[in-house]
Image: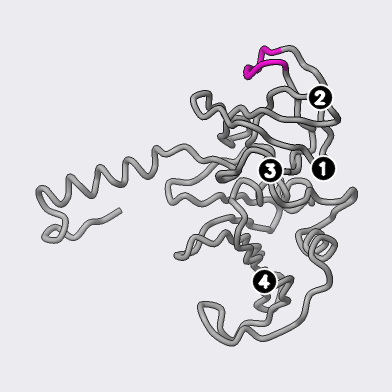
Amino acid sequence: MTFHRKLFSGKKFRITLCILIFLFSMEIFAIGDYQPGSELYVITERGLNLRDNASPSGKKLILIPFGAKVKVGVRLTENPMTADGISGYWAEITYNKKTGFAFDGYLSEFKAPPKGCKSFKDYITKTFGKGKEETVPAGDYEGRSAIRFGSNILYLTEGGSTWDLYFPGISMEELFLIGRACKEVQSKTLKLEPSGEFGEGFGMVMNSIYKDENGVVIFRRTP
């Protein structure tokens, strides 16, 4: 990263550097704030262990299956943990009349992909219904061909095999886990680059997950 000497000299440089260090050292949490009583979905294919206390060494009560809906209680913010590169907290969880504690990084307000999901397009079609084709009328994607799902989700194409999924309201971590379940993402661990983006390559394909300037999460596929 190159700084303009005059603009970022002396005190301004030190303040800017501290801000950058802070931003790059922040932990990433999969799901935002939720209220006690919220119902969320398990989006890790391995399922989610419900334990008798808020610790990986706690006694396992039950394995909550992939796709199950659970009710969350108190989030224990003093007890963070990380798994698969995803950070979260222990939270009180109720499932199938059993109450215990589980890692909330594998939970989402969005439904888990159905069995046999083969792509993001398959997921959003089955979750939000058939989309409507359009040409984006304004904004950053003006003029691009798109399929709109619901009111805000856009599947954008550029011709050839390059496409973008514009998905407001979801986190990078949630999209990573859903992408894994739908065979779009190959990596087992979420590793972010210094820019804050996730990137992977396999065969002749490149995937990236990032946030645009408005904070909206986007998945991009390029050949």
Magenta residues, as a range?
52-58
* Mark toward the viewer: 1 or 3: 3
Cα distance in 3D space between marks 3 and 4? 27 Å
Question: Does residue 203 appear to the left or right of 170 in the view shown?
Answer: right
Residue underneath mark 3: 38
Amino acid carrying mark 4 in the image: Leu
Sooner in the amino-acid sequence: mark 1 or mark 3: 3
The image quadrant that residue 187 belongs to is top right
Report the disc number at residue 67.
Answer: 1
Count the marks: how many? 4
Sooner in the amino-acid sequence: mark 3 or mark 2: 3
Residue beneath the point at 81% across and 24% down: 98
- In percent of width and height, residue 65 lies at 84, 34
Report the disc number at residue 98.
Answer: 2
The image quadrant that residue 43 belongs to is top right
Cα distance in 3D space between marks 4 and 2? 38 Å
93 falls in the magenta region:
no
Amino acid carrying mark 3 in the image: Ser
Quarter the C terminus occupies: bottom right
